Amino acid sequence: MIQRQTMLNVADNSGAKVVQCINILGGTKKHYARIGDIIVVAVKKARPRKDIKLHDVVKAVVVRQKQPYRRKDGTYIRFDDNACCILVQDKKLPKGNRILGPIPRELKEKGFEKIVTLAKDIV
């Protein structure tokens, strides 16, 4: 469960390290984002000389969450951290060209095939 003001790690090499959720897309009454949801984030820490700079406002997709996520077969999956992947504006493509850490297979069902193909560890 990712809500506003939540700090997330970035799971790609786009240049951002830590981001803060400032809005959840998908309706006016949506208070929480889960795996596969698109959020609007502000960059709080960034690597120097990269595309994404400090204080940029970009869209991202949630790829990991600490809260246990229930799969359709009844099992639960959870991760050690909250993480997201920065997206190219108005598309479901990642800004970086490498995805770090484990990625759940539910992202492929939600239309983020490119993120799943770039990831080395699919859970």
Image (cartoon, grey):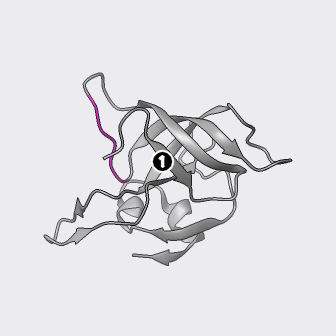
The one nearer the camera, 111 or 13, is: 13
Establish if 48 lies above or below 66.
above
Residue 67: % across, % down = 28, 56
Prevalent SS, magenta region: loop
The residue that appears at 34% across and 32% down in the rendered structure is: 26
Determine if residue 24 is in view.
yes
Q: Label 1: how many residues lie within 10 Å, few (<14), some (14-19) or many (20+)?
A: many
Residue 94: % across, % down = 61, 52
Residue 1: % across, % down = 30, 47
User: Residue at the top extreme?
Assistant: 28
Q: Quadrant of residue 2?
A: top left
The residue segment tinted magenta is 30-35
The total number of labels drawn is 1
The residue that appears at 31% across and 66% down in the rendered structure is: 78
Q: Is residue 120 left or right of residue 54?
A: left
Q: Which residue is mark 1?
A: 61
Name the kind of residue labelled 1 in the image: Val
Q: Quadrant of residue 57?
A: top right
Please say whether residue 15 is one of the residues in the magenta stretch.
no
Q: Quadrant of residue 59?
A: top right
The one nearer the camera, 35 or 88, is: 35
- The quarter of the rendered structure image containing the C terminus is bottom left
Determine if residue 89 is in view.
no
